[in-house]
Amino acid sequence: MSEPQAGRRVTGRWQGLLVSVRDASEASDALAGGAAIIDVKEPARGPLGAANADVAAAVAAAVGGAVPWTLACGELATGEAAAWATRSCAAAAALPAAAKAGPAGLSPEAWRKSYAAFAAALPAGVEPVAVAYADWRRTAAPDPATLISAAAEIGCRTLLIDTGDKTGPGLFAASAGAVADWIDAAHGAGMAVAAAGRLTLDEIARAREIGADVVAVRGAVCRGGRGGVVERNLVQAAGTLLASAVILARPVPGAPA
């Protein structure tokens, strides 16, 4: 692992390429391609679409402890994220390392309450992940800076920066150049950070270079895009690009220029 750079806090808890899969076959190909984390989701159900419990269980079996696996549980505003997590955790032979649900349609205060309820419902050992949408205006979500501040106050340990509208701009286009600042803010609060949001292969290194601990992809490693099928050679290519990235030093806030 790279040494920490000035202005960066490298957490070491989560590192590498996360690949979102929709079934056990895709999980096997992602593992063969070198994915460091396997995330189970159903892309047809939204940006963090929850997969059926039997699918999550099959993915967990395919992973078999080789790497951590995580769980997408939909949107907090539906009130069903905890139920999706509970069913999947009960069905799987091994618990996921983490679970997440999106902030679309919530005010900052509503997000706090919904996130707390979701976190409390997870089995012991399953880490709740806070999610900020870079395209918060399109999804009526809290702006990332506000959400990161709230997440820090309630002790969140991991943040995912994603896009909520998968028909809209990707992460860097949606964020107007603010992604690095959000990553810095989360690191400053002691959180590990995953970056996602319609990242292309060309953008994988960029996400790592600005400090993302984890770079999360699906469409970039699928034949046919986000709704297609994960291919191990594309996962391998993504992993190579990620490994080649050099974390860029950024100024420490308040330090002399």
Image (tube, rainbow, N blue to C red):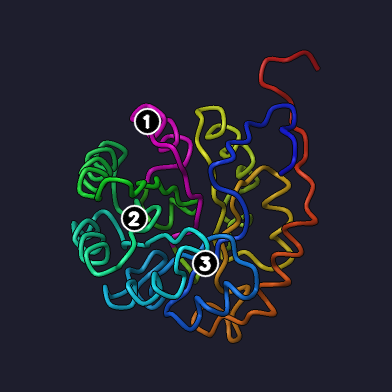
Q: Amino acid at mark 1?
A: Gly
**Looking at the image, is 97 positioned above or below residue 250?**
below
**Looking at the image, is 83 positioned above or below residue 147?**
below
Which element type, helix, strand or loop, lies under badge 1?
loop
The image quadrant where one finds the N terminus is top right
Left/right placement of residue 5 relative to residue 105 reads: right
Quarter-of-image position of residue 193: top right
Left/right placement of residue 115 relative to residue 12 reads: left
Q: CA distance from mark 3 to mark 2?
A: 19 Å
The answer to if 18 sits in the magenta stretch is no
Pointer 2 local density, CA inside 10 Å: few below 14, some 14–19, many at least 20: many
Q: Are marks 3 and 2 in contact (CB under 8 Å)?
A: no
Left/right placement of residue 235 relative to residue 63 reads: right
Residue drawn 50% across the image and 28% down it: 189
Residue drawn 45% across the image and 36% down it: 148
Residue 168: assigned label: 3
Towards the viewer: 220 or 232? 232
**Looking at the image, is 99 positioned above or below residue 226?**
above
Q: Amino acid at mark 2?
A: Ala
Query: If you read the primary sequence from the N terminus, does the residue marked by circle 1 or circle 3 appear first?
Result: 1
Query: If you read the primary sequence from the N terminus, does the residue marked by circle 1 or circle 2 appear first?
Result: 2
From the image, state whether disc 1 or disc 3 is nearer to you: 1
x and y percentages locating residue 187 in the rendered image: 56, 33
Towards the viewer: 131 or 229? 229
Q: State the extent of the magenta-drawn residues as a range.
A: 142-164
Q: Which residue is mark 2?
A: 101
Q: CA distance from mark 1 to mark 3?
A: 31 Å
Query: If you read the primary sequence from the N terminus, does the residue marked by circle 3 or circle 2 appear first?
Result: 2
Residue 155: assigned label: 1
From the image, state whether disc 1 or disc 2 is nearer to you: 1
**Looking at the image, is 170 positioned above or below residue 190?**
below
